[in-house]
Structures are given as C-alpha cells and as structure tokens.
Amino acid sequence: METFILVFKVLGFGDLCLYPASFEYYAPASLDEAIDLLNKHREEARVLAGGHSLIPMMKLRVLRPAYVIDLNRVKGLKYIEEKGGEIRIGALTTYYDVITSDIVKRRVPILAECASVVADPQVRNWGTIGGSLSHCDPSGDMGSSILALRAKMVAKGSSGERVIESDDWFVGSFQSALKTGEILREIVIPTPKPGSGGAYLKLERKAGDYAIAAVGVQVTLDGSGSCTYAGIGLTAVGPTNLRAKKAEQALVGRKVDDRVIEEAARAATEDCRPTDDPLRGSAEYKRAMVGVLTKRALNKALADAKRSR
Amino acid sequence: MTALIYPADAKVRLELTVNGERRVGEAEPRMLLVHFIREVLGLTGTHVGCDTSNCGACTVVLNGRAVKSCTVFAVQANGGSLLTVEGLARKGRLHPIQEGFWEKHGLQCGYCTPGMMMAAYDLLQKSPNPTEEEIRRGISGNLCRCTGYVKIVEAIEYAAQKLRSDPSWRSGGD
C-alpha cells in the first residue's frame, strides 16, 4: 500500500482522501448474476470479495469504480474439500478458514503457514484467497504457495469456465490472467503424495507488513530419499510472484543433502528479480534473503517430508 | 433471487443487530462501517485511528469475526450482527476483558483500547487459553503508542482466566 501512497504523492494528487468516490453497489445472489453485471459494466466495475485490497485502493482513489459487485451474498463460494486427488478451495474462503481447515493442515500445511503470516488477525478474518489471487499483488503471500503447489485456477465467465495453470496466472503486477468479465471461482490443488512437506517463510520489517522477501517451498521425497517434486515460489522479489525454476531443477531427481540445499538456495537467488526500494531494502539485500529463506524453508519442508513418508 | 442494487449517492435503509438490539440507519454505498457506527448509530466508542487498516482502533466484531470497520462498507453489514465495545458489558457488569484492562492498567491514553478489546474478544473466542505469544499475535493488528503492550497482554491474560472460570460470559455475547 505504501507504494500506492508514494505514487499518489509523486503524481501530485495532494492530500490523501480516505473516503471512496461514490459508486453503485450490487449484491448479486448468484455467481451467474455477478458475471452478468460484470459483463454489463466491464472496466467500470470491480468485484468485492474480502475488500481488504480493493477498499484501501478506493479510499486512496487509485481505483474509482462506478460499480462495485459484492460477492459476499453469493452462496457456495466458501469451502475447502478433498476429492479425487484434488483439494478444491472456493474463492471466497478466508485466510482464517484456510488456517483452521483440517484438510489444509493435513494435506497442504504450506497454505496454512502462508495464510497465517498474511497481515493481521482482522485482515485474515475477512481477506479471501480468491481475492488475493485475483488482485495479483507481487507482494501477496498466497501466490507463492499456489506456484509451489502448481495449483490451477477455475475462472468463470459468460461463456462458461476455463482452467488456468498457476504458471500462466501471474501476468504482471496487479494483473492476473482473468479476462474482463471473468471471476475466479475456485482454486484446485493436486493433493501432494505421501512423503511431501512444505513451508512458507516470510521476512517482514514489522508485524503484519508486506514481505521484504518470502519463500514458499513444497517437496516430495520417494522411498530412497530422492526428490521427486519441488515447487518453489518467491514473494515480493519480482514484478509478480515468481517460480524459482533453477532452484527446483537443482533438487528434482537428487538425494537432497546439505550441499544440494545450498545449491538450490544459490539458484533461487538467481531466479529472483528484486528491485531497490526505500522501505524494504536494496535488491542486493533481498536477493541475499531469498537465499537464506530458501535454505531454511527447504530444511523445514524436507524434515516434514521425511516424517510423512 | 435477484441482485440488491443500491444506487450511488442514494441513502439506503440498513437494518442490523447491534449489540443485541435491532437498529436501523441510512447510509450511501460508499459510507464505511466505522462512520456508520459513529455518526449514524451514535456509538462513538469505536475509534477512527489511521483510516488505512493499519492501527486497529476501529476494530468491531461483524458476524462473529473481528474486522477493521474502516475497511468494510456499511452496506455489507446490512442484515448482519455487529458487536462494538459498547456491547461488551452486561447489565452494568464490565465484561472480563474490560475488567482486565481496568485491573491490569491495560491503557494509558485509551485511544486504542476499544479496538484492542474487540481484537482480544476475537482472540479469546478462537483460543480461550492463549499463551503470551498467541496474545501478542492476536493483537498484532492493533497499535498502541503508549503502553509498550506489556500491560495489555496482562489484561488479556486476566480476561482469559476470568472467562474460563465464568462460562456465563461465553454464551451469546453477540
């Protein structure tokens, strides 16, 4: 958010206005109705989920939608279920729901760990996984876990649904693969195999802040201790959440010992693309922290993977 | 079922349960919940601090979950259930959280206190027997610029213990 305030001041808009511009409010009762409204008003409309990114942006007048479409009265968008080797999460599921879900804790603890370091308890009560992913803030925590887990996003528009791979989801800063008129309905995570472990580690300046850097790691080990799957997502060190592909390659097919972990951590520092910023440190510092966090997250994820085999 | 439509700039009639009572008030769609609570309902215990969802002074409990009321529109609360700091005490008896802040001197200037207490309420609903660390995490969305938090943590520990020993407070608060 500081970035917005900065941009705002630089552009000379003067005093911050902490009251949103007026808008027409819709509370549709179904997703189809929401999609109809979104298609009617196109770029003039914004979809409201938890509102904890949208409302601050409206207060700062970074966004001035003429129409706000509130999804909170739409039934059936809040669930976490496991079926047929997949975990399905409704877009309106809150961080708090994710943190307290038995399915998440048992199958994809990386998601619970990740959700528990987003902002603060009040925000986690209201902020939603679908809202966060649609917002596509490069400092958003959830995106890195989604990349590490290679989840799929189910988007619904007027002509039906399409499935978008997490690799294709993060198009740019604050830009998801959603087309105008589409709404993210569900996140689908392939259930990790036995012998899997995950971790999400975040370095922040102060409680509840955006990350200086954060790393999400998901690994699977086979019976002989070889790594058969590695997913690594990076937060706040690029124009979008990034996949650390070189780091993943350093792990897959190998027995992971301390030397391999060091190698992967070094590769992650090459995968990231941080920039200098006046609030959270230099690119050099962030790059170094990506190395440290990757190493620590790998150690934790590997320990969990060994335990669950 | 069709969509609710509230035109811009027009005042809409909202009906919700506030501290156990049915309340009605008018708000245009862009009105934030905190302003509705203070200016329309006249409940000024909920404070406006930073207006940017950082400080937590405006924390209330909406539909059973704590929220920073500067970051939710009043229209979103329509038909819902709201608990503010004014709703904590019952029949002239301070809520254990309020008693804790009194007994342990959990405040100095008092500005952050209503939000701090509502965050504590949310925490103790979810975790009736929190560790010190859990309490500190539980209030991590609330800023206090006076106390250094030590006394606030003690106040919440006091409240947790009291609530555990007197379960009558736990039922039907909101």
Image (cartoon, coloured by chain):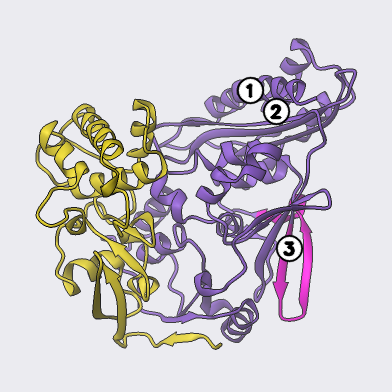
Of residues A74 and B20, the one nearer the viewer is: B20
Does residue A248 appear to the left or right of B80 in the view shown? right
Q: Which residue is mark 3?
A: A154
The residue located at (56%, 84%) in the rendering is A41
The label nearer to you, 2 versus 3, is: 3
Q: In the rendering, at what x and y percent does residue B15 appear?
A: 31, 79
Q: In the rendering, at what x and y percent does residue B153 appear?
A: 25, 31
Q: Which mark is residue A291?
A: 1
Q: Which residue is mark 2?
A: A268
Alpha-carbon distance for marks 3 and 1? 33 Å
Which residue type does callout 3 highlight?
Val
Which residue type does callout 1 highlight?
Gly
Does residue A71 appear to the left or right of A119 in the view shown? right
**Do marks 2 and 1 both belong to one polypeptide chain?**
yes
Question: Badge 3, how many Cα within 10 Å: few under 14, some, many 20+?
Answer: many
Chain A drawn in what color? purple
Q: In the rendering, at what x and y percent does residue B148 appear?
A: 21, 29
Circles 2 and 1 in contact, beta carbons < 8 Å: yes
Magenta span covers which residues? A153-171
Secondary structure at badge 3 equals strand
Residue A80 makes an appearance in the image = yes
Of residues A289 and A96, the one nearer the viewer is: A96
Chain identifier, colour yellow: B
Q: Which mark is residue A309?
A: none
**Do marks 2 and 3 both belong to one polypeptide chain?**
yes
Q: Quadrant of the N terminus of chain B?
A: bottom right
The residue located at (65%, 76%) in the rendering is A181
Q: Earlier in the sequence, mark 3 or mark 1?
A: 3
Question: Badge 1, how many Cα within 10 Å: few under 14, some, many 20+?
Answer: many
